[in-house]
Amino acid sequence: MKDLTSPIWIKVKGILFLLVGILAVVLVLLEQPTWKVALLLALAVWCFCHFYYFAFYVIEHYVDASYKFSGLGSFVAYWFQRRNKK
């Protein structure tokens, strides 16, 4: 698959991710409209965002500057290769 390089389509892709995420949250809250579910959803989103930041920015800038990640699959492969070397 070719890399997405068009700035317009990159923005469209980002907006679509945002809309799908909002739709998913709304549908879950319509199914179970409680404060507990809302707080757990917010916590899950916050944690996944921080994991994504960790996987791409922290590892690349503070742990191993020589490795460039191309996606979460690349990060998982890197993580297991690193564990096997120890």
Image: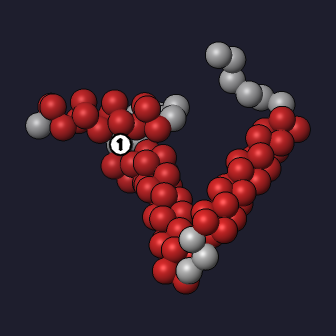
Q: Which secondary structure, mark 1? A: loop
The C terminus: image quadrant: top left
Residue 44 higher or lower than 53, as above or below: below
Residue at figure coordinates x 61%, y 76% from the top left: 33
Query: Would residue 18 be seen by someone viewing this image from the given angle?
Result: no
| Amino acid residing under circle 1 | Asp
Q: In the displayed image of the protein, which residue is found farthest to the front?
A: 31
Q: Nearer the viewer, residue 85 or 51?
A: 51
Place residue 19 in its image quadrant.
bottom right
Q: Nearer the viewer, residue 58 or 31?
A: 31
Q: In the displayed image of the protein, which residue is found farthest to the top?
A: 1
Place residue 4 in its image quadrant.
top right
Q: Which residue is mark 1?
A: 64
The N terminus: image quadrant: top right
Residue at figure coordinates x 51%, y 74% from the top left: 37
Residue at figure coordinates x 15%, y 31% from the top left: 85
Residue 77 relative to residue 31: left or right: left
Residue 80 higher or lower than 45, as above or below: above
Q: In the displayed image of the protein, which residue is found farthest to the right?
A: 8
Q: Is the residue marked by circle 1 packed among few (<14), some (14-19), or many (20+) residues within 10 Å?
A: few
Give the image location of residue 12, x and y in percent: 83, 42
Tally of numbered discs: 1
Residue 49 relative to residue 20: left or right: left
